[in-house]
């Protein structure tokens, strides 16, 4: 591999974005549909699902650093990270379908099946997503190009999620006219085939350019773990990432319940005519608008951060995400316009954060190499995936437990206490996660001036090899 600070070709940026298009189709299926699938289709209690999410995702999050360490030590003619996109594509698709399948089992058997298939799904997700995330760190060492790659990544990510939110309910209804469980299985099968193809396209369309600085000291797992344990910016971003994923997970996991049980079907007037929109249509529109405005935020991330700096942009976006989420709590079921307007504001604010976080992880990898003389890109980036998993773990578990705590029972009319809980989950409680992320990022120290010095020093080191 060669050192390269040249601009990444547009086609390669698109190829890189396709990888997260594939992953994020399933990420949105997990965050927006899986809890609902388990409670309202598969027949598992919300409390049991919350506990399952906690147990399986903690194990899954622990796998992320291990996968990063493995990828750092992979040597092939395709590089360190790209091979995993090729070889895990098909297993990813197969396990994805099994996760959303509904075998005829006893209640206890169903719970075991959910534990096994979901654990396997998270393992194959890690096996493809950690190397994919790490790939950005070796495609270029230019901070601006990294932010651009992160933006393409999240345009792909939100586009993949948007495909799911715009089509999933319709496909499930189409294939599941007589059996909703079959509707889920056939729908996931379509997404699984698309994901496998896109992973292969990312493999073929990207390059690994950067090689690490060669030192006289051989890097070991002990060295890598010692280095990262002293990396303050890594811990800060870990906390900020966990908190913002709690925010996203609570919102995502609450949407279907919010519309099915609180907003319900609504009659809207337009041009003198009245139209009745079902809760299914409204929830699909809300989820799609949420992701579409996330894309707007992603596009704004680079120009805004170029003017304000990554840290300040991240902090302001987290605060606005929280405030606009709090606003949602006060809207009545028939205030559809205000519900959707607040969704636009939340979506743009939250969308700005994610590409910045990934770009900042690339900076942290450079900082670690500059400070120690050893590079552990896979381990650094696996920590970002780990923060996603922990945030997602806590958010998913909290969602299930809160539903149970507020007295939720599937497919019945909910009590006032339960409806209040659902409203709090999607607004105030979620917003507190965004505020917590702001608290962490306040202590982040790798600003643009400092990183410019780091990059220049690393370039000189590579030139002298």
Image (cartoon, rainbow, N blue to C red):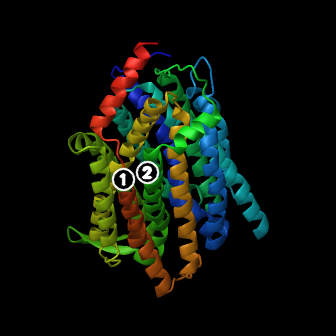
On screen, residue 2 versus residue 82, left or right, reads left
Image height of 72 relative to 157, above or below: above
Neighbours of disc 1 within 10 Å: few (<14), some (14-19), many (20+): few
Image height of 300 relative to 366, above or below: below
Position of residue 329 measured from the top left corner of the image (x, y, whole percent): 35, 75
The kind of secondary structure element at disc 2 is helix
Q: Which image quadrant is residue 127 in?
A: top right
Visible residue check, residue 286: no
Rendered residue at 53%/57% (across/down) = 392
Q: How far apart are the alpha carbons under marks 1 and 2?
A: 7 Å
Query: Which mark identifies residue 323?
Result: none
The kind of secondary structure element at disc 1 is loop
Rendered residue at 51%/34% (across/down) = 134
Q: Which image quadrant is residue 423 in?
A: bottom left
Q: CB under 8 Å between callouts 1 and 2?
A: yes
Position of residue 340 measured from the top left corner of the image (x, y, whole percent): 31, 65
Position of residue 395 measured from the top left corner of the image (x, y, whole percent): 52, 63
Visible residue check, residue 108: yes
Position of residue 255 measured from the top left corner of the image (x, y, whole percent): 45, 66
Rendered residue at 38%/52% (across/down) = 291
Neighbours of disc 2 within 10 Å: few (<14), some (14-19), many (20+): some
Mark 2, residue position: 236
Rendered residue at 61%/24% (across/down) = 218
User: Of residues 232 and 16, which is closer to you in this image?
Assistant: 232
Image height of 109 relative to 149, above or below: below
Mark 1 vs mark 2: which is more N-terminal?
2
User: Of residues 305 and 278, which is closer to you in this image?
Assistant: 305
Query: Which mark identifies residue 443?
Result: 1
């Amino acid at each position: 591999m060669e050192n390269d600070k040249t601009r990444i070709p547009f086609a390669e940026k698109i190829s890189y974005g396709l990888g997260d298009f594939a992953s994020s189709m399933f990420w949105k299926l997990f965050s927006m549909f899986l809890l609902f699938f388990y409670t309202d289709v598969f027949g598992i209690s919300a409390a049991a699902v919350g506990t399952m999410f906690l147990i399986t995702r903690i194990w899954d999050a622990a796998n992320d650093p291990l996968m990063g360490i493995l990828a750092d030590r992979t040597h092939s003619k395709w590089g360190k990270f790209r091979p995993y996109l090729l070889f895990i594509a098909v297993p990813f698709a197969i396990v994805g379908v099994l996760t959303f399948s509904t075998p005829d089992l006893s209640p206890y058997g169903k719970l075991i099946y959910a534990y096994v298939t979901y654990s396997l799904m998270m393992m194959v997700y890690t096996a493809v997503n950690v190397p994919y995330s790490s790939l950005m760190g070796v495609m270029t060492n230019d901070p601006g190009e990294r932010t651009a790659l992160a933006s393409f990544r999240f345009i792909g990510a939100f586009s993949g999620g948007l495909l799911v939110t715009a089509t999933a309910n319709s496909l499930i209804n189409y294939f599941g006219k007589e059996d909703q469980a079959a509707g889920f299985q056939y729908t996931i099968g379509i997404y699984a085939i698309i994901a496998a193809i896109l992973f292969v396209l990312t493999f073929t369309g990207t390059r690994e350019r950067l090689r690490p600085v060669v030192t006289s000291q051989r890097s070991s797992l002990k060295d890598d773990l010692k280095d990262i344990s002293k990396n303050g910016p890594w811990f800060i971003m870990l906390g900020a990432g966990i908190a913002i994923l709690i925010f996203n997970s609570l919102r995502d996991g609450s949407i279907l319940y919010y519309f099915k049980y609180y907003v319900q079907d609504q009659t809207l007037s337009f041009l003198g005519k009245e139209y009745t929109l079902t809760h299914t249509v409204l929830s699909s529109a809300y989820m799609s608008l949420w992701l579409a405005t996330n894309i707007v935020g992603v596009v704004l991330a680079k120009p805004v951060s170029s003017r304000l700096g990554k840290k300040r942009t991240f902090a302001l976006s987290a605060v606005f995400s929280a405030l606009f989420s709090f606003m949602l709590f006060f809207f009545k079921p028939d205030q559809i316009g205000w519900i959707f307007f607040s969704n636009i504001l939340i979506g743009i604010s939250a969308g700005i954060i994610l590409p910045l976080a990934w770009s900042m992880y690339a900076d942290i990898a450079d900082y670690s190499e500059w400070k120690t003389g050893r590079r552990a890109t896979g381990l650094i980036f696996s920590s970002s995936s780990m923060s996603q998993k922990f945030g997602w773990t806590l958010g998913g578990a909290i969602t299930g437990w809160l539903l149970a705590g507020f007295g939720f029972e599937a497919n019945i009319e909910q009590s006032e206490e339960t409806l209040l809980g659902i409203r709090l989950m999607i607004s105030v409680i979620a917003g507190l996660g965004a505020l917590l992320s702001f608290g962490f990022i306040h202590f982040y120290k790798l600003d643009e001036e400092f990183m410019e010095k780091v990059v220049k020093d690393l370039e000189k080191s590579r030139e002298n090899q």
